[in-house]
């Protein structure tokens, strides 16, 4: 996985810098998301990995499958990826692009997993507190996991805050066994 990120990083950065310079981050984000979704399809992934197809054929197929979601500059990007045999990296490129975009926009996606469905007021309060703590705009996505017993687990990028009852019980068990 680290190798894929290493290979995808220069392409994601180049796309980001171009899009940022043109003020088209949202358009590029949508185009890359569409292209990444298309490239994840098993039939498309097989075609992209096949040496029987030339780079031009692979690029043309991707452009055709993405349809109107790709403007001319997006199509050129797909052609560059095809020429360099990097079309299978589209999901990683898209993910890295989104990270760069979030950093630029000073926003972060936060996943809150709780034992029970959160009320809207509690979710908004948590978003405000996290926004101050992380100094970013916070976009909260909630999930329910009854195995937590109570409390919440918050994930924001590589930051994880485990305030669940299950997590506390695990820590207590480890402390008692030490």
Image (tube, rainbow, N blue to C red):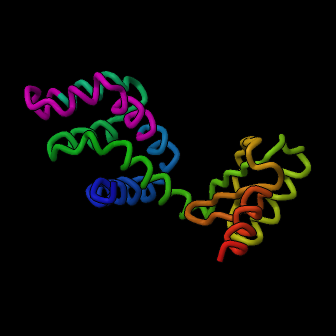
Q: How many discs mark residues in the rendered view? A: 0
Where residue 59 sits, quadrant-wise, is top left
Residue 119 vertical placement versus 23 (above, below)? above
Where residue 90 sits, quadrant-wise, is top left
Q: Is 135 displayed left or right of 59 in the figure?
A: right
Where residue 169 sits, quadrant-wise, is bottom right
Please tell me which residue is depicted at 38% across the width and 33% down the height of the picture. Answer: 70
Please tell me which residue is depicted at 52% across the width and 45% down the height of the picture. Answer: 26
**Magenta-highlighted residues:** 32-57
Q: Residue furthest front?
A: 177
Please tell me which residue is depicted at 67% across the width and 51% down the height of the picture. Answer: 111
Q: Position of residue 61 (x, y in %)?
A: 24, 24
Residue 134 vertical placement versus 87 (above, below)? below
Residue 122 vertical placement versus 106 (above, below)? above
Please tell me which residue is depicted at 33% across the width and 54% down the height of the picture. Answer: 1
Instruction: Confirm whether the magenta stretch covers residue 55.
Output: yes
Q: Tell me which secondary structure the magenta stretch mostly adopts.
A: helix
Q: Is 126 displayed left or right of 111 in the figure?
A: right
Q: Position of residue 93 (x, y in %)?
A: 36, 49
Foreground of the two, 107 or 118? 118
Instruction: Confirm whether the magenta stretch covers residue 36.
Output: yes
Q: Position of residue 145 (x, y in %)?
A: 73, 42
Q: Is 149 displayed left or right of 37 in the figure?
A: right
Q: Which quarter of the rendered picture does the C terminus lie within?
A: bottom right
């Amino acid at each position: 996985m680290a190798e894929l990120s290493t290979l995808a990083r220069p392409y994601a950065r180049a796309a980001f810098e171009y899009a940022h310079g043109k003020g088209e981050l949202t358009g590029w984000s949508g185009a890359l998301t569409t292209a990444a979704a298309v490239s994840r399809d098993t039939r498309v992934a097989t075609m992209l990995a096949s040496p029987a197809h030339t780079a031009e054929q692979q690029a043309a197929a991707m452009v055709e499958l993405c349809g109107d979601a790709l403007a001319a500059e997006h199509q050129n990007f797909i052609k560059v990826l095809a020429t360099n045999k990097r079309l299978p990296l589209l999901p990683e490129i898209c993910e890295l692009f989104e990270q760069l975009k979030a950093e630029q926009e000073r926003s972060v996606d936060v996943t809150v997993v709780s034992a029970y469905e959160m009320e809207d007021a509690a979710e908004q309060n948590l978003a405000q507190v996290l926004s101050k703590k992380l100094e970013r705009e916070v976009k909260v996505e909630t999930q329910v996991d009854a195995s937590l017993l109570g409390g919440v687990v918050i994930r924001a990028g590589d930051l994880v805050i485990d305030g669940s009852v299950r997590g506390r019980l695990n820590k207590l068990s480890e402390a008692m066994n030490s």
